[in-house]
Amino acid sequence: MAVLLKINHDGPVTSLGFVTGSSLLLAGVGSYLRVFDYKKSELLSSFSIFSRNKIHGISIHDNVVVLYGGRNLSVLALDQLTSGDSQRDLTSFQKSCDDLIIDIQFSSNYQTDNLIYILTAHNIVIGVSIFLSDSIDLKIQFTKSCSEKSLLYSGSIKVTQDSAIVCAGTVLSGILLWDLNSGKILHNLVGHEGSIFGVKFNQKGDKLVSCSDDRSIKLWDFTTGENLATGWGHTARIWYLSFFNNDTQVLSASEDLTMKIWNINIEPGSDSNSNKFSLNYTQNVESHIGKHIWSCDIQQDQLLSVTGGNDGKICLHDISTKFAKNSKSKQFSYSLNQLSLNYEIFNKNDVIKNFVNFNDKGLLLTTSLGNLFLIKDNFQKFELIKKESNLNNQFSIINHQFQNNHIVILTSTTADQLILKFDNDLNIIEKKLLNILTDVNDYPYFKITNTFKFSNDNNDDNDNEKEKEKEILNILFESPNPNNPLIVRTLNLKDLSYSNDPENMWFLPKPQTEKRFIITCIEYSIQKKWLFIGSRFTNLVIYDLSKNPHQMQAWKKISKGDSISNLNIVKCFNDTLLLRIFIKDGIYFLAKITENLNYNNEINEINKIINGFNNLNIDNEKSLFQIEILLENKIAKGGFLEGAFERKSDLKFDTLISKDHENIKSNDLILYGFKSNYFYLYNETKNYEIWNNMCGGSHRSWKLFIDSDDTQIKGKFMYTKSNSIIISSFGYEDKLKFKEPVLLEGTHGREIRDLSISKKSYKFSNSNSKEILYKHLVSVSEDNSLKLGRFFSNGSIKNIWFERIHVSGLQKVKFINEEFICSSAAREEFFIWRVQDLEIVDKPLIYCYDKLKPFSSNPDLRVMDFDTILIFDNKNLVGFIFATVYSDSSIRVFYYDLKLKQFNLIISDFYKTCCVMNSKFIINDKLNKIYLCISSTDGHLVIYDVENTSKEEGELEVKKLSKMVMRKELHQNSIKSMVVENKSCEYGSGNEYYIITGGDDNGLILSRFSIDVKTGEENIEIETLIRDGASSTITSISLSGKRKDDLKIRLIVTSVDQIVRLYEIDQEKNEMVLIDKEYTTVADTGCSSICEFEDKEYCVIGGTGMSVWKINNDE
Amino acid sequence: MGKGSKDKRDLYYRKAKEEGWRARSAFKLLQLDEQFNLFEGVRNVVDLCAAPGSWSQVLSQKLNCIDSSSSSKIVAVDLQPMSPIPGVECIQADITHPKTLERILGIFNGQLADFICSDGAPDVTGLHDIDEYIQAQLILSALQLTTCILKPGGTFVAKIFRGRDIDLLYSQLGNLFEKVICAKPRSSRSTSLESFIVCINYKPQKDWKPKLTLNQSTEEFFKDANLGRAKLSESLENNLPFEERVVAPFIACGDLSSYDSDATYSIEEGKQTTSLDPVQMPTAPPYKKALEMKRKGILLRQ
Ligand SMILES: C[S@@+](CC[C@H](N)C(=O)[O-])C[C@H]1O[C@@H](n2cnc3c(N)ncnc32)[C@H](O)[C@@H]1O
């Protein structure tokens, strides 16, 4: 039996095919076929189709499914793929051609002739008949070609009544259309530049669309061969093109990660021959990450499309409702013109200033000239509420309260207030005029620039408190004068009057900041009576209103960026509160806030303002509140981040070999904001855009209303645009075509450079399910992202966070203990991350704890690798020693102080001038020795003695490396991977180490490094040298933690030849031998990691995609 | 990153500019020559996929073509146009097209070539199977020309990417040459999969006469060559598992003391700080217009 067993695979989705007349969807993910019920968003089963090639195309005719990829094809019966637990390994069915297959189609008379047409990359069509009996037999009937056997990049076969037309996209800009029967070339369509990447007929057969390396889409007339129109819009190559919606629209999918919908516009001419055509894209859908949407298909009857990316994600799109030309039906507007005409008050200088949304029942608008309009009856009717004649003030600052009472409070800059109370049908039932300054004597010149309300609208669970609070509403008034405090008054909602009890009238001093303090958002915890305020220039202030006098603590400039756009209490329990903080410029935090019980009240004013979140470990001691950042991330797209909410989605644990239907829900984080000229909702957990609206950009008044629904996201986005208010709704489709758009989550969209798995296992438990074990898995990619996910014990991997803090391509990532991760990248980036899996939060959280400052002003070095020693003081972890190695041959050793968050450089030196690839400490406690072992592009292994350079108290001088104790040429070229393992004492002195290296020269070498106890002399010996350890560069080596027969050390070796090899070291013989090898469809195979769940070992391999293997250690 | 930064990161790029090579690739051929002494007694050469032309420059220099009395012949072929090089005849054509091979044969007019090289690389799509296929087709086309025109005992050098089926190619080439070596010049980054096959001492297949006809695919050309390539069977049986795979010996070439292409070098103090212009500007890509439109913001949806 094999030692290595594949159990899961994530990677580029290279083909997709809907099965007409059913809810089945077939997807080619690597060489595996995954079968989905897309309506239920459920994976039905997975099959292994080809032994090496990926599935690049799917053709289906009734019960016959043809899959192809590379030179391989496989003909299967659909029943075979849908009937329960049938055989999963179907590789014995694979057949092959002598050339790359570009397209396969069924003949129009398939029922009688059983013929399929295979177009190959040399523009040759092979006609093959299929005999389906007990076995599936294929037989070549004919081979046809036209006079040009040039190489094709793309092509398609258009089956006609009695034959077929071949559309051949050549390498050099031409499209050849030839008749299959006669072999005659009908047209050579010229006009594109570069290789042709796609060409396809419409259903009717009178037009074609094509695309090429020039990134344009061209529409052609088949009869004349004329280029009718050219569409521009994609910024990279286009990999999919098809007509849909009765040939009236075109869908494209591209390397640039967008799927676009194009309208074919026809401007009628004098006769049909002189019609003018144009191609414009009307919709843009972004639902993948990294690079490339490789595959796509359209369910023509349902107007549904599905895309598959290099990121391994499969995403469904409704291309009817969302994109129908009359999408205005889901969007309507009222212009001021229309609103005011009936009342004869129309003034073209009047503009809508602000508005309030009544729980999705209607709107109240204010205008710059002080008019008030009410839109009600489900947005169908409107009326003017005349302004009070005895007041000239314009009310434009609005506050509202609408749980049980529909109350709107309008405030003018001169502190006048108009309070309106509505019934459920939005009829005014009470009206009141007040001035809030009449009983505030100290501030006669208090100009009001903004008001904020706070009451019970948050997630606090304390019910009694909530009931009581509902009867009152706190209103905060802000003035531009920095010396004026913030005034908070309490409005009694029963009689619409302010309490003038001094107990209920608060004057909160503003923090003294250099730049004017302007509030941008507030949040309040009723339970704790804590008021949070966010401002311009990213200041965060907390007022503790439970104390008398009120206490204040401020953090100045908590992040880069212009302002805090939103504050959001997630949870509040016992003594802790979880707060989400959104920075408008696209950063968000999750912070844990606790009261500092040791806070010294006497402390002076200065300490009430702390500079940023930089030094929380120290600042927390002296501040009123203690803040711990649990999560920090940056949004994927630029633009403005305005806030977020959560929604539940199913968590599935399917793998290649097992299906898990347990109904477990998990929360997805949905972000919203603006990018250039549109507003978006983005699923941050699954990385796709849910909805967008071309509102014109963020400079307007707007409100987002989300209907409370656990899973489906629906709501309204309302905004002002010039003189109109526009209400646009989403998610209210009558019948959902599918349950959930993301069928497969996938992973990074670019090559995975390194990955690491936590030692510790965590338990995932849900109220109604059994406990499932998982580990934290962190992976880094060339696309600058660091991903934290859960790796479940059945082999499935679920994404949690894609961290986007790095700005350059990553090199390495490692867990250095259960809580800390380090990552290194180009541009001298070396980051320490903290991962916490707290009971109070539903998922693990990750925060960039610290960053090593680059040494050069224009950092252009890559931090190639690092190793770590943990430093304890009385069993408490106090710091780390890092050895980082760089692309310019530098080697640096640091001591990092965890509490002070400080890197102290201990050693700084160079190896030579070549790039250092690996860094590893060898620690021998018995002999009290610390060595640093490095390998480099010159093929040498070098060992330094660093024991006498370890940290001493008060020592500041930066040292050089002591001289090398060892330098040995092992490989001809670069050493790509290196691991070190202590040889067991049972088989030697205990002072011996195996060093296993893999190189660019295909070589795998076992060396033994030993230290003589008596003389202290070091020695290195090559024990096994395997010249062709792989047939290409060896990119990673991972050590198993187990010992086979208590003797043998196992290791997994990956190479870009896509073979995963298992080697074994016999410690008695000091010998390394190959035990097993298996092919993996993960290309660019570059990293691996081994972990253990309940005594069983698993290996995760990363490259362009990820695969999971079980190591059968009994074999 | 600016131009200066590339100078610093890539020493070979900088050196190429200083020494007047059109591309840093020149050093790869020079380092291969250092190791294998490729040009001894060589007069007639075909340089496939040659643009912008640094290999042709090296060849022109080494075969002493600057001297107009030289009897050497160098033919360079590429999809892209190339500016002239003394003693080199440039053809702009697709090497995977049989017509191109015919044109080259025409120029040699019955004479045989001593050395054929191809530094061809397709525009990668990112889809490995396709990229590997196109790369294999480039090599196959070069090999097609080789079997038609290389003199017995001649040398063939071609760029390869050591992907998953490289062992298959090694085994096929083994049928045509005495020695097949996988060589990696130090000027080729170790982070890239690129290396070069150096095939020494051409021995034509005994019972097979290569015959180039216009309307023929590479597969058809090699059909009876008995190189161990996959064949089309009547019932499309999968013959892949029986294909032979061998690993060619690997040789790193270029002196260890020569520059490391993965390392970051700092530009020496006092040395020129203004960066040099690239010797040969890259030619216009097909998507030039799309780039321009993107820059002008015309690609946004209405
Ligand atoms: C790496 S460059 C060659 C550099 C060249 N050896 C030098 O030293 O300047 C690869 C070249 O292959 C060419 N190429 C790719 N496919 C080709 C084809 N089918 N026919 C001809 N040239 C091709 C490209 O146009 C490109 O110029």
Image: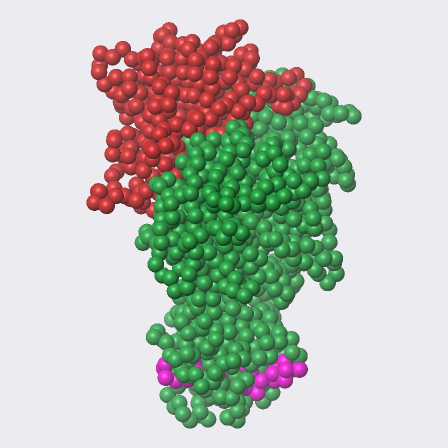
Observer-nearest of A922 and A15 = A922
Seen in the image, is B92 located left or right of residue A89? left
Chain seen in red? B
Give the magenta range.
A464-492
Based on the displayed image, in which of its 4 quarters is residue B27 positioned? Answer: top left
Q: Is residue A197 visible?
A: no
Q: Colour of chain A?
A: green
Residue at 73% across, 51% down: A661
Instruction: Pick out the residue farthest to the right.
Output: A134
Q: Nearer the viewer, residue A226 or A17?
A: A17
What percent of the width, then of the height, locates residue A746?
59, 46
Say above or below: A1091 vs A129: below
Residue A97 place in picture, x, y as percent: 61, 22
- Queried whether the magenta region covers residue A647, the answer comes back as no
- Comparing A401 with A1062, the one in front is A1062
Q: Is residue A528 found left or right of A267 in the rendered image?
A: right
The image quarter in which residue A561 lies: bottom left
Q: Compared with residue A137, is residue A15 higher up or lower down, i.e. above or below?
A: below
Seen from this angle, which residue lies furthest front?
A: A1014
**Can residue A617 be seen in this snapshot?**
yes
List x then y, in percent, for residue A972. Answer: 44, 31
Tell me what residue is drawn at x 56 percent, y 37 percent.
Answer: A1054
Question: Along the line of sight, which residue is nearer the eye, B199 or A74?
Answer: B199
Left of A1005 or right of it: where is A470?
right
- Rendered residue at 70%/23% (across/down): A130
Colouring of the image? by chain
Residue A354 locus on image (x, y percent): 47, 72
Vertical arrangement, residue A250 with respect to residue A121, above or below: below
* A258 up-or-down from A177: above or below: below
